[in-house]
Image (spheres, rainbow, N blue to C red):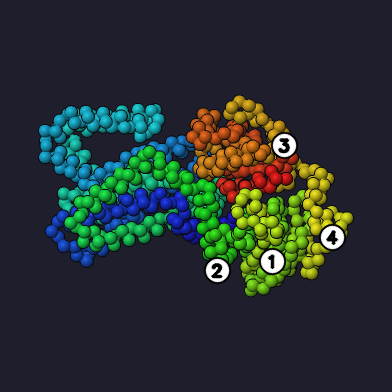
Amino acid sequence: MQEVTIGLALIAGFLSFISPCVLPLIPAYIGYMGGRVTRSVAVQTSGTNVETQGSALASRMGLMLHSLVFVLGFTTVFVILGLVTTGIISSLGSVRFLITDIIGRVGGLLIILFGLHFMGIVPIVFRWLRKHDNILNSVALTIVIALVISLIIPWAFVEILIALPIIMAFLIWLFLGGAFTEPGKFWGQLMNGFERIFYTDTRKQMNANDAGGLSGSFVMGIVFAAGWTPCIGPIYGAILNTASLTGEVGSAVVSLTAYSLGLGIPFMLTALLLERAQGILRRLQRHMRIIEIISGSFLIFIGVLVASGQLQSLSTTLSTGSFSDLTYRIEECTIGFVQGEMGFEHLGSCYGGELEVIAINQGLHGIMAADSNPHQYLLHIDNEDLAEPLYLDVEVSRLDNMTPSVSLYDPSGDTVAQSDVLIQLEDDRYQILSAIPIEQTGLYRLVINNTKASNEASNDGNEDDRSKYQVRFVRSQEANPAGDAEQSSDGPLTDIATEGVSSIEALAQQSDAIEGLEIGNTAPDFTITTIDGEQTSLESLRGQTVLLNFWGTWCGPCRREMPDLQALYEQYADDGLTILAIAVNDTTEDILAFQEEFDLTFPLALDEDDVVNKLYNITSQPSTILIDPEGVIQFQSFGIVTQSQLVPVITSILAS
């Protein structure tokens, strides 16, 4: 991934607003800001003052200020949790999730309280208490409130060891504050403080959109940040991986802040749209009470979702699987357009998954359904690439139900080369274009199609009818502009049209992969004990396709990745796939809790002395290595991995 600049991080954050995992935040935010607008109009229309142009401007600026403070609260938690996610502060371990659980529960209760306030119930209760001094001055009121809150605190703070000191501090505060000796004075001051902090002093009939209550908006930003699982796109993933590899906390803070502020821009624009709704609400003045009840009820509903963890669960669901793929494409395609790696006319195909940006030496997997369009790849050639004569080969590998043909077009759209002849290079790797001269800068477009007759005839979309492959541009070893790639039939490179696919097996038997960490090397052996107490080694797993996953319970991307791995295990375990997930900087207790939370059925192990991680040179979590039944590394991913990346490789290995 390219270096992440502040501008790229800002753009990526802005794009994240339309990603699936942000959807749960939008109604929650609208519910909160809409409640403020509704309450503001209710306060204004209840008085006799006519709003002037100046007060309208102040109202608009006040709402924007609340929106900005909300985004700042959101950014504060997002940056902190992002740093924890990178592993820079991985020593906190699963404490990260305890913190978010506490913020979610406490924050959910706070949102419910906001909802009651926006409905007008809290002001009604306050007015009633102020009119009934006998109740407000009663010690019984203090005792009842103390008992209720003391029962709520253990649930809100999850762990009893955390809750007990808070209960004690709460009771001491009541005693020292005079709640038992002068209850009327104590609760009166508390109600006044609540009105100042959460809103503005409604007894003075001030504009509810002004600077009063900014702390409430900041707290709401914190609450919603704790209830959100960010989608891992290429930019956000690059920020986390770079920070984890280099340990540059300052750079990560700047990038994460830019990303979060970019995400906050649409929220602020939404606030402007809500402000324009004030005119409509004033015209509906007769129904203002009903509108207040509806907006407050909606906010209470959101509060229940946050407090129960359902909003967080929905956000997590929308950040995995096909939703994660969509998020990745939206960001990757738009960033590619901004950086000049694709044209505007390519965006539609890119968003639809039919076109991808590819770099020299980058292998990309593809899946082509029977009724799908040809896949396209854009290669951006700049002046640095042409500093010396450039000749490129196009290679394909891992062909499954696929007889490919390719066409390469130059930046002006003219055909550079075409071919459907495969030249075998080694086991399951073929050359289809050879020594193509690249003489100008710009976007080169590679179109790959499937000419297999059975696939063309099929149109039912079954799994068995889908074509799978990997494609790669590589620098040619031949300085031959003519691109003559003919090979002797008795040489190591054999024309597949002459020898057939059976030669793959013969070639595989003739060569033994050396041990190492690169794709094509034999994976280093190790022995480790799973959390179930069973000792296993990589050698003992020979004959199975092994997915090694390096992770931690403290790792946010790992948490989002695990449901996909479990789904893959359930789908392919009977066909010979096994998953061994190796945690580091963790405890057995945390891993067992994680296993129960996600219903994981594949083996989990703890690398207590960091032996296996060092053996495989793992510097960031999650990292994934896929090993075939012969013990050879076939795939690596240092960062979050998706099903769309793994499925083609797994099925290809299992099929062979």
Mark earlier in primary sequence (3, 2):
2
Which residue in the rendered view is the most extreme toward the top? 533
Q: Nearer the viewer, residue 417 or 441?
A: 417
Quote the CA–CA distance across marks 3 and 4: 34 Å
Residue drawn 63% across the image and 69% down it = 442
What number is the disc on residue 83? none
Which residue in the rendered view is the most extreme toward the right? 490
Contact between marks 4 and 2 (CB within 8 A): the answer is no
Quote the CA–CA distance across marks 4 and 1: 22 Å
Quote the CA–CA distance across marks 3 and 2: 47 Å
Q: Secondary structure at mark 1?
A: strand
Residue drawn 65% across the image and 43% down it = 625
Up/down of 27 relative to 621, above or below: below
The answer to whether residue 84 of the structure is visible from this angle is: yes
What number is the disc on residue 543? 3
What number is the disc on residue 407? 1
Quote the CA–CA distance across marks 3 and 1: 38 Å
Amino acid carrying label 4: it is Gln
Mark earlier in primary sequence (2, 1):
2
Residue corresponding to mark 2: 345
Mark earlier in primary sequence (3, 1):
1
Left or right of 495 in this view: 121: left
For mark 2, does the 10 Å Cα neighbourhood hold few (<14), some (14 to 19), or many (20 or more) residues?
A: few
Mark earlier in primary sequence (4, 2):
2
Amino acid carrying label 1: it is Ser
Mark earlier in primary sequence (3, 4):
4
Residue corresponding to mark 4: 487
Mark earlier in primary sequence (4, 1):
1
Q: Secondary structure at mark 3?
A: loop
Contact between marks 2 and 1 (CB within 8 A): the answer is no
Residue drawn 29% across the image and 57% down it = 63
For mark 1, does the 10 Å Cα neighbourhood hold few (<14), some (14 to 19), or many (20 or more) residues?
A: some
